Amino acid sequence: MNSKIKDYLILLGVASIVVVLDQWTKWLVRENIEFGAQWLPAWLSWLSPYARIVHWYNSGAAFGLFQNGNLIFTILAFIVIGAILYYYPFVENEDWTLKLAMGLQLAGAAGNLVDRLMMGKVTDFISIGTFPVFNVADSSITIGVIVLLLGVWIKERKEKRKAAGQLPPMGTMSVSSEQLPALSNVEGSVDSDRLSASSDQSSNTTGQEQ
């Protein structure tokens, strides 16, 4: 199988799983909870001051930001999705964190785009404390950013360790292969000078004895 096709299958596979989960959970909320209402299982009622499931709509960006900008964010979602699909094949196979981050970002953009195209607004339902209400797609975008930053940090640590491993220990000198012939010539000339000096000294000693 062509490596590029395989890469796209992995990308679309990750994105599809998240989008299906996002759309399924939104459908459950719309079908079972009235708009503006909230819900928690009876055995989790003690959590209601801190976390709850609500039915809310959002016409702006993730986490309820920039309301009434549905058209703008619809266009931006198409641009983001197109950029990810174009750039993804150029990512090195070893850079798995960037690939995973791009898959999660694609899923988040696509999940909310489906809502914008079908309803003109996004369904949000996860409410934690006083934090803006969000959904699975928003979470995917956030996790994608975290994975991306983690990948950058790991890459920087590897580069620093590699650079540290290439430095010679304190008090030692590294010699390249190009420098070895020159050093051999220097050592040879030094040895010749020593032999010449020894010969001169022995001649002087013999003359004095005579």
Image (spheres, rainbow, N blue to C red):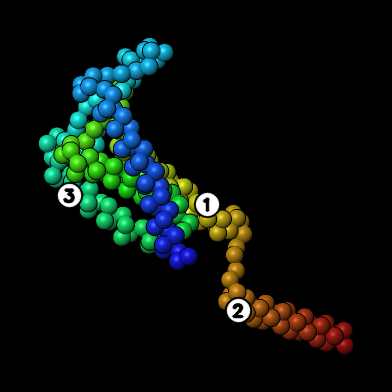
Q: Earlier in the sequence, mark 1 or mark 2?
A: 1
Q: Nearer the viewer, residue 131 or 15?
A: 15
In this view, 126 is above or below 203: above
How far apart are labels 1 and 2 at the CA level? 32 Å
Residue shown at 31%/54% (left/top)? 84
Residue at horizontal 43 percent and vertical 53 percent from the top: 10
**Crowdedness of circle 3 by 10 Å Cα count: few (<14), some, many (20+)?**
few
Residue carrying label 2: 182
Say which amino acid is labelled 1. Arg
Q: Secondary structure at mark 3?
A: helix
Find residue 161 and name its label.
1
Q: Tag 2: residue type?
A: Ala
Q: Is residue 45 visible?
A: yes
User: Sequence order check: which comes first, mark 1 or mark 3?
Assistant: 3
**Percent coordinates x, y for residue 147 in the rendering:** 40, 43
Precedes in sequence: disc 2 or disc 3: 3
Which of the 4 image quarters holds residue 168?
bottom right
- Classify 51 as above or below 184: above
Q: Which residue is mark 3?
A: 75
Q: Secondary structure at mark 1?
A: helix
Q: Are marks 1 and 2 in contact (CB under 8 Å)?
A: no
Q: Position of residue 82 (x, y in %)?
A: 26, 56
Q: Nearer the viewer, residue 120 or 151?
A: 120
Q: Name the image quarter holding residue 47.
A: top left
Q: Closest to the observer: 26 or 98?
A: 26
Query: Residue reaching furthest right?
Result: 210
> What residue lies at 21% left-to-right and 36% top-to-bottom?
122
| Dots 1, 3 in contact, CB < 8 A | no
